[in-house]
Image: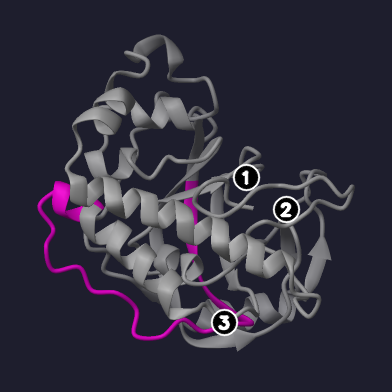
Amino acid sequence: MGSRSRGDGNYTNPCLTMHQPWASLLVYGIKRIEGRSWPSPITGRLWIHAAGKVPDPETIKAMEDFYRQLYELDGVTDLKFPEHYPVSRLIGCVEVVGCLKSEELASWEDVPQGVRLEGLTAFCWLCEKPQKLLIPFEMRGYQGVYNLERRVLEGALRGLSPVEAPLPIKFPLPDPRNPFSLTPGSLVNGLNKGSIKSKTEEDSSPTLKAAIAGARAAATQFSKKTNSSPAVVFQGQGSRTRSGAKEGVQILDNE
């Protein structure tokens, strides 16, 4: 429900369709980074729609294990996950405050270590201020970023509820006066490239390594299952662009 408009820059009430469990993890403030093979075309509010494919228990478990391990690095040991992962619904929104390349995020010491480890994709959309809909709206999603219809937007605005994130994050803007100052390449000059990423790969605990491997495997398997199903209307993770080029998979290369 809405118009496909990715790439034209005309976003008045932008929305992104994601597969579960990634969609709810983002709206509940557990997921702080939305990874894509393309940079974010917006800053500001981004509505989140959950695609129609029901996630299997193995995928949910792998992703919950992944985030449980990330949060333990920052001292959070009582992480509470969503009780349900609704599909074919508009479920809430986040604020996109910037977008970085994965190597920039991995080496950015101004944010918690768990956040840096979420950067497993080419481009990392930085998300703050999650809000969820008390009653999710049933609707159809589209590829890329698209605009919600006004009647959906009006109803959604009335039903939003702030989320108490387990570890609220505030990404520091290089230039507070410029909402687009966190763009791919903007932090390169001030970072020690690769230092944190290599330390993570070499020195992380076996449990964390297993969680990261599990998240990668879950994303890859999910993409394969989704792409093999002709009944799926929206091909979110592992989707293809209108030109037919494969966009990637969630977590490894979110859409």
Amino acid type shown at disc 1: Ile
Query: Which one is earlier in the sequence, the residue at label 2 or at label 3?
Result: 2
Q: Distance of mark 1 from mark 3, alpha carbons?
A: 28 Å
Q: Distance of mark 1 from mark 2, alpha carbons?
A: 8 Å
Asked whether the viewer can see residue 56, the reply is yes
Q: Is residue 77 magenta?
A: yes
Query: Which one is earlier in the sequence, the residue at label 1 or at label 2?
Result: 2
Amino acid type shown at disc 3: Val
View extreme (top): residue: 189
Judging by the rendered image, the residue that carries numbered circle 1 is: 42
Label 3 near label 2: C-beta < 8 Å? no
View extreme (right): residue: 243
Crowding at label 2, few (<14), some or many (≥20) Cα neighbours within 10 Å? some
> At 11% across and 62% down in the image, what residue appears?
77
User: Where in the figure is residue 37, as x and y percent of width and height?
Assistant: 63, 41
Q: Distance of mark 2 from mark 3, alpha carbons?
A: 29 Å
Q: Is residue 58 left or right of residue 75?
A: right
Q: Is residue 166 left or right of residue 139?
A: left
Judging by the rendered image, the residue that carries numbered circle 3 is: 54
Query: Which one is earlier in the sequence, the residue at label 1 or at label 3?
Result: 1
User: Where in the figure is residue 40, as x and y percent of width and height?
Assistant: 61, 42
**Relative height, residue 44 to residue 232 (above, below):** above
Residue numbers of the magenta segment: 70-96
Judging by the rendered image, the residue that carries numbered circle 2 is: 11
Amino acid type shown at disc 2: Tyr
Label 2 near label 1: C-beta < 8 Å? yes
User: Where in the figure is residue 91, as x and y percent of width and height?
Assistant: 52, 77
**Relative height, residue 160 to residue 96 (above, below):** below
Looking at the rendered image, the quarter that the N terminus falls into is: bottom right
Question: Nearest the camera: 206 or 17?
Answer: 206
User: Where in the figure is residue 150, as x and y percent of width and height?
Assistant: 73, 75
Q: Describe the element under mark 2 as helix, strand or loop.
A: loop
